[in-house]
Image: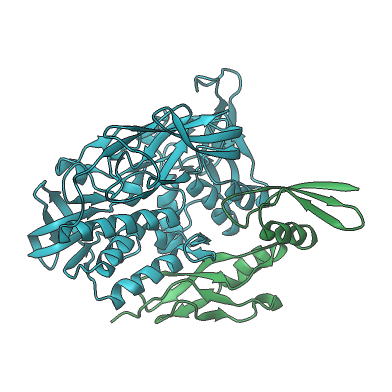
C-alpha cells in the first residue's frame, strides 16, 4: 500500500492535520485510528468549553470532534479505525494490524504523528498501600461514566487538580456521588481557573493544596485513603495525616505524550516536553516525519492542538510537493528563566516569517513580563497579571523585520 | 456598599472580578464585555450549561452525550440530571437534535452533543 501521507491518530490533532494536508493539495492520505471511532479523547469529554478560539463558541468535546469528522468525510479523506500501528521506520514505512487487513506495510512519502498522550498511573507516582479495586485514572473513570455508562463509585477522593480531575469532580457530583476532596501536592492547581470555579466552588468541594495521598486502605475495594500535608520537598509531614473514608480514588496526576512509535522511527525526544524536538513546520529530526498535538507537548486547550496540527498538515503537504525549505538560517529557541519549555525548538525562517511560540512557565508569577530575546536584544515583552504552569502561553514572533543569523538564539523568559 | 469577588468562567482567561454594589452595580477586573455580563448574572441568578448523558438504545454506544442549548439556573441542575437519567433515546440521532424540549419549564431544550448511527 502506498500513500502520500499517513496520519497516525484520529483525535483532534490527526483530524485537523489530515484536513489541512488535503486542502493543500495532497490527495492520497490515510488516517489511522486504533479506537472504534474517530474523535479521540474528545468523545468522552462531554463537558463544554471547547472551541472558544476556533469557533468562537463553547462546544462540548463530541461536538468539536464531529465538526472535524464531518469535514474529513466531506473531503473524502480515507481513514481506518480499529487499527494499531505497530512500527514506523525512518524510511516512513508504517506497519499496521487490524482484523480486516491483517498485518500490512504502508509506504508513505510523509508521516504525521498525532498519537496524543496517556495518563500517569498509580505506579508512576508510587502510592503505597493495598491494591484494591476502586482506583482509577480520572480519564478511565470518565470513559466508564460518559461512554460505557457505569458509575465508578459513591464516595470519591481525587488526587491531583489537573483539568480532568476537576471535570470529574463535577461530573461525579452531578451523578450523585459525594466527592470528599480534591488533593493537590503542589501549592497551586495545574487546572484552568474556570474549572476550579465551576467544578469545585459551585459544589463546595474542598481543594487541599500541598497535600497528597500517602496510603490506601481496603483489600478488595478501597475503604479509605490517608492524606497528609507535605513540606517544601514534597515529603509528608508527620502528624498531619487525615483519614478519609471513601470507596474510590481518582488519579489526575499528569499526562505523558505517547511516543513509543516515534522512538522506533528514530525520532529524538526532548526531555523538557517528553515529545519530539520539532521545527516551525512541526517536523521532527527525521525528514518527512511531522508531529502535532499532545504527542509533542501536553496542551490544555484543544483549540491550540488544532492550530498546531494545521501547521503540521500544511508543512507535510509542502514536503510532499518538495517545497519545504531546508536551506537558510536556523535559530533555536531556549527556555530561559521561569520557562519550562518552548515549542518549536528549531525555527527555519525561510519556511515561516511568523511563528507562534507555545510555552509553559515553571511556577506561578504575578505582575510579571514574558520576554522574548533574540540573543541579547529584547524583541517582545508582554505584561501579565498572572501566569501559571497550568495554562499554556503563546507569543507570535514576526521575523520579517529582524536581522537573523545562523545559530542565533531566541530566549523566552519571565521577568519579575 | 457591598463588594463581591468572583472569577469569570466565560473563557479560560479566568479574570478576577470585583463586583461593587452601590445604587448601581459596578464590575471591575473584566477584560471583556462577557465578564460584566457574567458578574451581573452570577449575582442575580447564577446559570450554567448542563452537560450529561442519557441512555441510548439501538446503537453500539450505551450513552448519548447531551447538553442544554442555553444556560439553566444553577439551582435546577440536580433536578434536570434526575429527569435526564430517566430518559431513553433510540438511535439514529443527529448532533443538535432536541432530546428534551423545555426541560422543567426553563425554556431551554436539551440537545444531542453528537450523532449516533443505529446498529446495522
Q: In the rendered image, which quarter contains the C terminus of chain B?
A: bottom left
Q: Is residue A5 above or below residue B57?
A: above
Q: Which residue is drawn at 58% across and 53% down?
A: A170
Q: The cyan chain is which one?
A: A
x then y, percent, for residue A126: 39, 29
Q: Which residue is drawn at 54% across and 20% down?
A: A232
Q: Residue at x 82, y 54 (%)?
A: B26
Q: For residue A100, which quarter of the picture? A: bottom left
Q: As rendered, which of A247 and B15 lies closer to the eye?
A: B15
Q: Residue at x 84, y 56 (%)?
A: B25
Q: Is residue A218 above or below residue A43?
A: above
Position of A100 with respect to A246 (left or right) is: left
Position of A237 with respect to A7 (left or right) is: right
x then y, percent, for residue B11: 59, 55
Instruction: Judge whether residue B63 can be spotted in this image.
Output: yes
x then y, percent, for residue A413: 47, 31
Q: Which shade of the palette goes to chain B?
A: green
x then y, percent, for residue A391: 51, 43
Instruction: Judge whether residue A7 can be spotted in this image.
Output: no
Amino acid at each position: 500500500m502506498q500513500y502520500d501521507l499517513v496520519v497516525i491518530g484520529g483525535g483532534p490533532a490527526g483530524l485537523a492535520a489530515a484536513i489541512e494536508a488535503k486542502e493543500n493539495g495532497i490527495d492520497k492520505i490515510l488516517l489511522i485510528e486504533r479506537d472504534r471511532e474517530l474523535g479521540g479523547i474528545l468523545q468522552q469529554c462531554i463537558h463544554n468549553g471547547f472551541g472558544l478560539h476556533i469557533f468562537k463558541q463553547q462546544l462540548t468535546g463530541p461536538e468539536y470532534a464531529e465538526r472535524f469528522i464531518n469535514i474529513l468525510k466531506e473531503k473524502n479523506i480515507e481513514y481506518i479505525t480499529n487499527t494499531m500501528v505497530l512500527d514506523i521506520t525512518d524510511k516512513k514505512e508504517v506497519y499496521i494490524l487490524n482484523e480486516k487487513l491483517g498485518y500490512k506495510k504502508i509506504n508513505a512519502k510523509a508521516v504525521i504523528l498525532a498519537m496524543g498522550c496517556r495518563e500517569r498511573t498509580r505506579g508512576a507516582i508510587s502510592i503505597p498501600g493495598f491494591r484494591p479495586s476502586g482506583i482509577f485514572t480520572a480519564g478511565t473513570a470518565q470513559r466508564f461514566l460518559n461512554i460505557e455508562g457505569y458509575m465508578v463509585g459513591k464516595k470519591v477522593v481525587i488526587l491531583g487538580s489537573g483539568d480532568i480531575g476537576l471535570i470529574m469532580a463535577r461530573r461525579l457530583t452531578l451523578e450523585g456521588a459525594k466527592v470528599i476532596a480534591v488533593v493537590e501536592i503542589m501549592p497551586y492547581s495545574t487546572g484552568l481557573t474556570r474549572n476550579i470555579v465551576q467544578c469545585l466552588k459551585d459544589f463546595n468541594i474542598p481543594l487541599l493544596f500541598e497535600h497528597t495521598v500517602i496510603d490506601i486502605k481496603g483489600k478488595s475495594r478501597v475503604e479509605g485513603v490517608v492524606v497528609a500535608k507535605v513540606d517544601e520537598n514534597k515529603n509528608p509531614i508527620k502528624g498531619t495525616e487525615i483519614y478519609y473514608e471513601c470507596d474510590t480514588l481518582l488519579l489526575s496526576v499528569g499526562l505523558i505524550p505517547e511516543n513509543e512509535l516515534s522512538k522506533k522511527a528514530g525520532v529524538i525526544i526532548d526531555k523538557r516536553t517528553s515529545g519530539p524536538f520539532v521545527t516551525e513546520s512541526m517536523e521532527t529530526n527525521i525528514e518527512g516525519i511531522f508531529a502535532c498535538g499532545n504527542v509533542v507537548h501536553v496542551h490544555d486547550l484543544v483549540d491550540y492542538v488544532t492550530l498546531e496540527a494545521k501547521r503540521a498538515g500544511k508543512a507535510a503537504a509542502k514536503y510532499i510537493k518538495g517545497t519545504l525549505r531546508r536551506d537558510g538560517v536556523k535559530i533555536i529557541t531556549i527556555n530561559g528563566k521561569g520557562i519550562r519549555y518552548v515549542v518549536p525548538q528549531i525555527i527555519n525562517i525561510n519556511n515561516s516569517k511568523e511563528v507562534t511560540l507555545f510555552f509553559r512557565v515553571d511556577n506561578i508569577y504575578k505582575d510579571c513580563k514574558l520576554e522574548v530575546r533574540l540573543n541579547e536584544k529584547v524583541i517582545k515583552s508582554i505584561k501579565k497579571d498572572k501566569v501559571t504552569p497550568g495554562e499554556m502561553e503563546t507569543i507570535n514572533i514576526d521575523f520579517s523585520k529582524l536581522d537573523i543569523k545562523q545559530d542565533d538564539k531566541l530566549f523566552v523568559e519571565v521577568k519579575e | 456598599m457591598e463588594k463581591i469577588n468572583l472569577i469569570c468562567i466565560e473563557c479560560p482567561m479566568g479574570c478576577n472580578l470585583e463586583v461593587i454594589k452601590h445604587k448601581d452595580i459596578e464590575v471591575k477586573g473584566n477584560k471583556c464585555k462577557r465578564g460584566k455580563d457574567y458578574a451581573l448574572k452570577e449575582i442575580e441568578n447564577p446559570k450554567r450549561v448542563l452537560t450529561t448523558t442519557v441512555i441510548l438504545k439501538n446503537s453500539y454506544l450505551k450513552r448519548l452525550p447531551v447538553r442544554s442549548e442555553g444556560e439553566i439556573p444553577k439551582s435546577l441542575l440536580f433536578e434536570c440530571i434526575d429527569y435526564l437519567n430517566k430518559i431513553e433515546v433510540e438511535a439514529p440521532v443527529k448532533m443538535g437534535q432536541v432530546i428534551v424540549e423545555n426541560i422543567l419549564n426553563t425554556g431551554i431544550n436539551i440537545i444531542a452533543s453528537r450523532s449516533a448511527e443505529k446498529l446495522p
